Image (cartoon, rainbow, N blue to C red):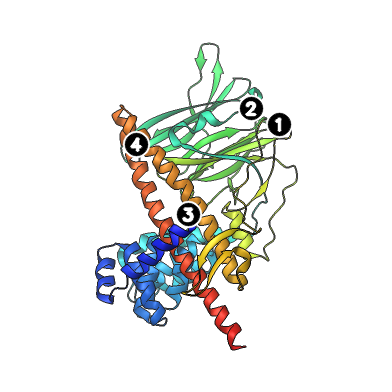
C-alpha cells in the first residue's frame, strides 16, 4: 500500500515539473536545488548531451550531497564552466576517490580562471587528499560491536569502561574564536597522573600533571612533538603508561580532528612524532576520543561523519592482536569500509552484554510490490524484474526508503520533544536539529524519486532490447 501511494505521488510530481529551462534556471539561481534538479533531470532525458543541463544538474546533485551522480554529470558537461573542475574534484574527494580529487584540484589551481576565494579551500583539500590517498591503501578491517547516535554534549557518559582503564571528565567552555570547546581530562587507573587539554592562544594543547600529597603538580606541556599550532585534544593513555592516543586537526589530518598515536621514548625522555592511525577510524570529518579497554578487549571512538549538527556516532569495536587490512583490488568495497558504510560484525569477548550491531540487510528474497513500469505493465513482485540492473536499483531504493522512514520517525520525535519542552536552551538546540533533519528528509525524498525514475528507465530499456531480439 505504501509503495502504491508513493508511485501515485511520483506520477503527480513528474507531471507537475514538466517545466521550461528558464524555470529551471530561475530555481537554480534561487538555490532551490531540489526543485531545479527535477526539471533538469527531465530536460536531460530529452537532451542527454547538453553541456549546460549536465553542469546545472551536477551542481544541484553536488549541493544535495549526491556526489556520485554529480561526478557523472560534471564529466558530461565539457570544459565551458570554470568552476566545474573545482566541484568535480570536491565530489571525488567526498566519494573517497582521492587520486582523481588530486588530479582535478591540480587542474583547477593551474587554470587561468581560478577563483581566488576558492584557493584556500582548494589548497587545504589538496593537502588532505594527498594524505588520504596514502592512507586508503591500508584500511584496517575492523569488527564493529555496536554504534549509537547521541548528542555530542553527552557522548562521554556512553563510554562503559572497566575501572582498570582509567577515568575521564569533560568540561565544555566557550572559545571566543571557535565556539564551544571540549576540555577533556584523563586520569590513569592508579590515579597518580593526569593528561588533559586546555586552552592557550585560542587553541587546545595537551598537558600533564602528577598527583602530590596535597593536590596536583604544576601542569607541563606534554611534548613539542605533540602540541602544534593546531588543536590537540581528547587524550587517552594506555595501561602501559607509554602509548598515547589523542585527536588533532594538524597538517597530517584528513578531516577536522583525526586520531593519532604516539609512544613515550625513554631514551630521549620524550614522545615520538605522532602517526595518523588511518581509516576507518579517521575520515574527512571529525574523529576523536579513541579509547582502548584492555580488560574488555574492546575499543571506542567518536565521529560526526554523516550526522546532523550536534549529533555524533559512538562506535565500539573489538581489539585484535593482529591487524587485518582490506584488500585494495575492490575499490568500491575498500571505500565503503573506509567510510564505515559496511563493516564486519563483532561482539564483546569477555562479556556478552551488547547485542551484535547490524544494518538493514539488502533485500535478496522475493518482495511483494506494486511497481508500474509503463502504462500497460505493472509488477507485483520483485522477481518479475527482467533486468538485473533494475533489480539492483530497486534494492538501492529499498534501503533509501528504509532510511527515509527512520529519519521521518526521528523528525516526528524531535518535533514532539520541541512542543513539550519548557527549557528555552533545549528548544533552541532542538530547533537546529529539526531544521538539519528536515533538509536530510527532503534530500532522501528526492533521492527516492530519482531512484524510481532510474529503475523504470532501466527496465523499459531492457524490455525494448529484449523485444528487438
Q: Residue at x 41, y 60 (%)?
A: 446
Q: As rendered, which of 334 and 430 lies closer to the eye?
A: 430
Q: Residue at x 47, y 54 (%)?
A: 2
The image quadrant that residue 192 belongs to is top right
State whether residue 447 is above or below residue 406: below
Callout 2: SS:
helix
Q: As rendered, which of 358 and 153 lies closer to the eye?
A: 358
Q: Is residue 2 visible?
A: yes
Indicate which disc residue 165 carries.
Answer: 2
Find the distance from the CA under tag 3 to the CA under tag 1. Answer: 38 Å
Give the residue at mark 4.
429
Residue that protrudes farthest toward the right in the picture: 322
Q: Residue at x 54, y 55 (%)?
A: 399
Q: Earlier in the sequence, mark 3 or mark 1?
A: 3
Q: Earlier in the sequence, mark 4 or mark 3?
A: 3
Residue that protrudes farthest toward the top in the picture: 214
Give the residue at mark 1.
352
Q: Is residue 122 visible?
A: no
Is residue 28 found left or right of 407 in the rendered image?
Answer: left
Amino acid at each position: 500500500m505504501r509503495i502504491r501511494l508513493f508511485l501515485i505521488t511520483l506520477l503527480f510530481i513528474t507531471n507537475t515539473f514538466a517545466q521550461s529551462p528558464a524555470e529551471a534556471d530561475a530555481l537554480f539561481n534561487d538555490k532551490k536545488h531540489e526543485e531545479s534538479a527535477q526539471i533538469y533531470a527531465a530536460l536531460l532525458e530529452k537532451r542527454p548531451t547538453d553541456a549546460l543541463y549536465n553542469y546545472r544538474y551536477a551542481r544541484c546533485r553536488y549541493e544535495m550531497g549526491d556526489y556520485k551522480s554529480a561526478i557523472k554529470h560534471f564529466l558530461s558537461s565539457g570544459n565551458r564552466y570554470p568552476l566545474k573542475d573545482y566541484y568535480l574534484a570536491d565530489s571525488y574527494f567526498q566519494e573517497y576517490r582521492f587520486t582523481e580529487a588530486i588530479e582535478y584540484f591540480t587542474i583547477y589551481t593551474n587554470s587561468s580562471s581560478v577563483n581566488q576565494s576558492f584557493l584556500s579551500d582548494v589548497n587545504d583539500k589538496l593537502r588532505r587528499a594527498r594524505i588520504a590517498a596514502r592512507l586508503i591503501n591500508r584500511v584496517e578491517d575492523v569488527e564493529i560491536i555496536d554504534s549509537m547516535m547521541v548528542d555530542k554534549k553527552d557522548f562521554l557518559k556512553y563510554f562503559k569502561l572497566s575501572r582498570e582503564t582509567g577515568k575521564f571528565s569533560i568540561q565544555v567552555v566557550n572559545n571566543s574564536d571557535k565556539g564551544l570547546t571540549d576540555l577533556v581530562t584523563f586520569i590513569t587507573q592508579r590515579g597518580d597522573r593526569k593528561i588533559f587539554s586546555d586552552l592557550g592562544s585560542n587553541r587546545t594543547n595537551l598537558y600533564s600533571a602528577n598527583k602530590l600529597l596535597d593536590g596536583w603538580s604544576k601542569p607541563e606541556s606534554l611534548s613539542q612533538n605533540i602540541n602544534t599550532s593546531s588543536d590537540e585534544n581528547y587524550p587517552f593513555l594506555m595501561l602501559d603508561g607509554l602509548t598515547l592516543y589523542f585527536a588533532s586537526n594538524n597538517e597530517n589530518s584528513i578531516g577536522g580532528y583525526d586520531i593519532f598515536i604516539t609512544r613515550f621514548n625513554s631514551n630521549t625522555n620524550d614522545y615520538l612524532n605522532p602517526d595518523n592511525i588511518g581509516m576507518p577510524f579517521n575520515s574527512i570529518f571529525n574523529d576523536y576520543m579513541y579509547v582502548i579497554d584492555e580488560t574488555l578487549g574492546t575499543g571506542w571512538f567518536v565521529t560526526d561523519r554523516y550526522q546532523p549538527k550536534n549529533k555524533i556516532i559512538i562506535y565500539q569495536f573489538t581489539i585484535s592482536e593482529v591487524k587485518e587490512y582490506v584488500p585494495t583490488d575492490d575499490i568500491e568495497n575498500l571505500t565503503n569500509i573506509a567510510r564505515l558504510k559496511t563493516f564486519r560484525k563483532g561482539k564483546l569477548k569477555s562479556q556478552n552484554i551488547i547485542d551484535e550491531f547490524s544494518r538493514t540487510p539488502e533485500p535478496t528474497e522475493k518482495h511483494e510490490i506494486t511497481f508500474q513500469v509503463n502504462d500497460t505493465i505493472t509488477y507485483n513482485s520483485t522477481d518479475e524484474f527482467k533486468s538485473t540492473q533494475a533489480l539492483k536499483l530497486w534494492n538501492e531504493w529499498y534501503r533509501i526508503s528504509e532510511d527515509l522512514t527512520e529519519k521521518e520517525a526521528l523528525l516526528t520525535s524531535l518535533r514532539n520533544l520541541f512542543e513539550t519542552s519548557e527549557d528555552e536552551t533545549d528548544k533552541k538546540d532542538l530547533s537546529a536539529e529539526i531544521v538539519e533533519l528536515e533538509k536530510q528528509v527532503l534530500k532522501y525524498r528526492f533521492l527516492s524519486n530519482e531512484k524510481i525514475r532510474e529503475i523504470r528507465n532501466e527496465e523499459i530499456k531492457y524490455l525494448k532490447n529484449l523485444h528487438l531480439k
